Every structure is written in structure tokens, then in C-alpha cells.
Image (tube, helix red, strand yellow):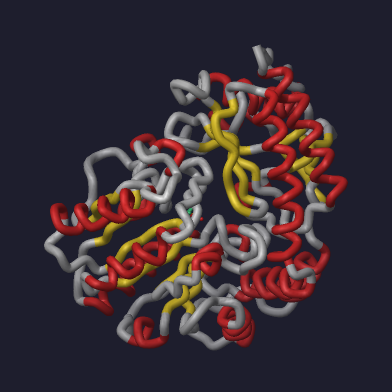
Amino acid sequence: MQTAFEMEPRARALTADQKDYLFPWVRPYYSEPLALSSGEGVWVRDVEGDEYLDLFAGILTTSLGHCHPAVLDAVGTQMGKLGHTSALYVTEGQIEAARSLAEITPGALRSTCFTNSGTEAVESAIAAARLYTGQHEIVALRLAYSGRSTLTSHMTAQGAWRLPGGGVDGVVHARSPYSYRSPVGGGPEATSFFIDDLVEVIETTTGGKPAAFFAETIQGVAGVIVPPPDYFQQAAEVIRSYGGLFISDEVQAGFGRSGEQWFAIQHWGVEPDLMVMAKGIANGYPVGATVARPEIAETWQGPSISTYGGNPISMAAMRATLDVMKSENVPSRAAERGAQLRAGLEALRSSYGWIGDVRGMGLMQGIEIVTDRESKTPDGDRTGALLEAAREERLLIGRGGLNGHVIRIGPSLLITEDELAEGVRRLQSACRRADG
Ligand SMILES: Cc1ncc(COP(=O)(O)O)c(C=O)c1O
């Protein structure tokens, strides 16, 4: 197995200073943290000048790659023009960003409010759903990750990610549509198994009138959990039959990442009532967006404000990001490169008995690591070793899963065929190191 990475002096000094000055929850990956200083496309450099191939993109966020010239240009121009206004004034940039979003969101979704993070986008969606329905309870999914505020950390359903000190009122959790670990597997009975649980949770743990069902279309932090194909159709029908709204969280899976479609929910022909987005929306600049049907947005008259929400610089970054995404047709690129990545991961699975499952859509893929395929016991230790081994290979990948036992891959949507092939080669070498 992999030995600990030898840290260079500059990185060691920065890591010591980080410990001194930052909260300990600001916790970097790796036994010897990696200090990055620059990036271009899918490549990043550490403070010592070593180059890494980035297949995790700052948690699926630098959707066009690091320092994309069109985004740099738009941000630079905007900074020299008007850097901040607050939401008290009208700016063209914010309106055009919302228009640009409405062009690609499904169905009647059209009205947007901008914030600065996924957490705030989720908070805004929940508030809007509660105002519109006049109801309070929220049905979320187990294994969800929804953010770090009090509400969203308790919509999150992985113990380690919750803020300490009990839950919040009015949030219940249905079973995650996690076929690999469900007693019925991923076969034809899977959907009814998960849907029956959703109904039972509503019937037994709510007053029968939930405000909304809230779900990530592909559960990311949970380890790239893709639901059975008819799951969301049926889940949306269920929540609407109880008078609630369906909110889809596209923070990770949105903006073409799942391949072919702009948003993952579109694969299953479902029109959500609200949608939340962040991460890849602005190539790393802080933007959260909550998009709603206009009549839902209409019920939230305020007052409410986000000082930085819709900030001109963030909006310029977002518009430039969406423009490039549209002109490069990233959904179809992600489908093509996703198929290439998936083939590479499946080949690894056929070589190593400790790879229990390979799953995902487009350029959002996961590898579930187990002690053996028979018992399916999650193997967080080997996953940690694989993460470190990948770093030795100068390859950045991510980690997730309740037991830290899933490798997550989500590179720039503009990654080329050669770059991805190189990434798969490095991952193969890392697997060899972690084997044994
Ligand atoms: C699916 C999902 N929703 C919401 C969030 C919260 O986003 P942020 O970290 O920008 O607050 C995350 C963050 O990882 C996420 O993955």
C-alpha cells in the first residue's frame, strides 16, 4: 500500500499556518495536505511547482477548467466597470444571467433568485416551497448532502456532516434510491421498493401535508448514487398527490455534467417545481441559484436580501460560463467523454475484486470500494490509500460515501479525449499501488 507523501518545505509551512489560523473543519485532503497555487484547464500546480491532472475540478465546480480565458476576460472587464451594487439596484448582468438560465431550465421554471452558495440556494428553495404551499415539512433523502447551515446540514443525512446538537423541526428522510445496497438490488422491483418507503415516510413521520420532496438527482457526496430510471417520475407523482412540491438539487449534476441534457432530471422527463444550482454554474465563482415556476416565486414578496447575491462580478462569470457551455455543447461533450471514462473504470472493475460498483452518468462517476464483492463491506481504508496513491501519480480525484469508501470523479466538462485517457492511465497506476 501507499506510504505517506513526503511534504515539501513550503507546503509544510502553509499547512502549519492553516492549522494556526483556520477552524479545523477547513480540512484538506491527504495525510500531508496539498497546497495549490495555480491552474489552467485540467492542470493545477502546487506551491513547489509540481503539476497534477485534476479530475475532481474543485468538487465538480471548475466546469470549464481552471482559469478559462472567456471567464477571466468577463470577470476582469466587469471588475474594472462595477464590482458591487447590492441587490438594492437593478443590474443588467443579473437579469441576463437569469434569462440565460431560463433558456435551459426545463418546463415552466423561469424565475431565479441568486445567492452565493449551494447552501443558500437550498435554503431559498425550501423557504419558497413553504411560502407557496403554506406547509412546513420537508421530505429529504437519506445519504443526502445539502449544505452547512443549520437547516441544510440537517437535511443532510450522513451523520458525520451534520452540525452537532440535534435535528431541526420538520425534516424527515426517505430511503436513498441506492440500488447497489438495497435488499432488492437494481432490478425491476427497485423503484417500487424506494417509492413505498417514500410513501411510508410521508404517512408515518409527517402530518400528511409536506411542503416538498427535496432530492439530489444524482447523490454526489453519498458516492454518486444514480436512482432507477423511473424513480423520479413516481416520486414527483407521490409528493404532488400529498399537495407538496418537487425540488430537484442539481448543484453537482447540473450544467451538462450528466451528459446529453443540461440537468440530470431531464433524463427522466420530470419537470421539477423548483431547482437549485451552484458549483459548476460559474466555473468556481460564488453563485447559488434557485429557479422556480413564476407563481411559486410570486408568493415570496419579502423583504429579504442577499448582499452579494447577483453580484456583478459573479454574474459576469456565470454568463461567460454559460455562453461557453452553450457554444461548446457541453451536454454532448460530457456524454462522449463520460462514455470514455466509464469504459476505463469498468476495465478497472474487471481487474480488481475490491471494486464493488462503478456507476454514474456522463462526467460524474463513482467507484465503490469494498473488501470483497460477496460481503460488499465498505472499505474506507483502501479508498484512502487509493486517494493517496492517485496523488503520488499526480492525479486529483475525490472521495465520498457514508464510510468514505467511494472514489468520485468529476473533471472539467471541456476535458479532451487525450487528457481523460491520461487520467485513466494514472488511475490504473494508482490502483496497482493500492492493490495488496
Ligand atoms: C448536492 C449539493 N447540494 C448543496 C450543496 C451545498 O453547496 P455549497 O457548499 O456551495 O454551500 C452541495 C455541496 O457540496 C451539494 O453537493
Of residues 210 and 200, which is closer to you in this image?
A: 200
Task: Identify which residue is drawn at 49% across, 44% down.
Answer: 221
Kindly identify the residue that appears in the image at 73 percent across and 20 percent down. 432
Residue 187 higher or lower than 210, as above or below: above
| Quadrant location, the C terminus | top right
Q: Nearer the viewer, residue 184 or 178?
A: 184
Whether residue 174 sits left or right of residue 382 in the image: it is left
Mark count? 0
Q: What residue do we see at 72% from left, 18% from top?
A: 433
* Residue 230 % position (x, y): 43, 61
- Relative to 317, does residue 392 appear above or below in the rendering? above
Q: Is residue 108 visible?
A: yes
Q: Could you tell me if residue 307 is visible in this image?
A: no
Q: Position of residue 168 (x, y in %)?
A: 23, 51
Q: Nearer the viewer, residue 332 or 139?
A: 332
The foreground one among 205 and 193 is: 193
- The single residue placed furthest to the front in the displayed view is 188
Q: State left or right for residue 330 relative to residue 263.
A: right
Q: Position of residue 385 (x, y in %)?
A: 62, 21
Q: Residue at x 69, y 24 (%)?
A: 351
- Tell me the quarter of the image containing the N terminus: top right
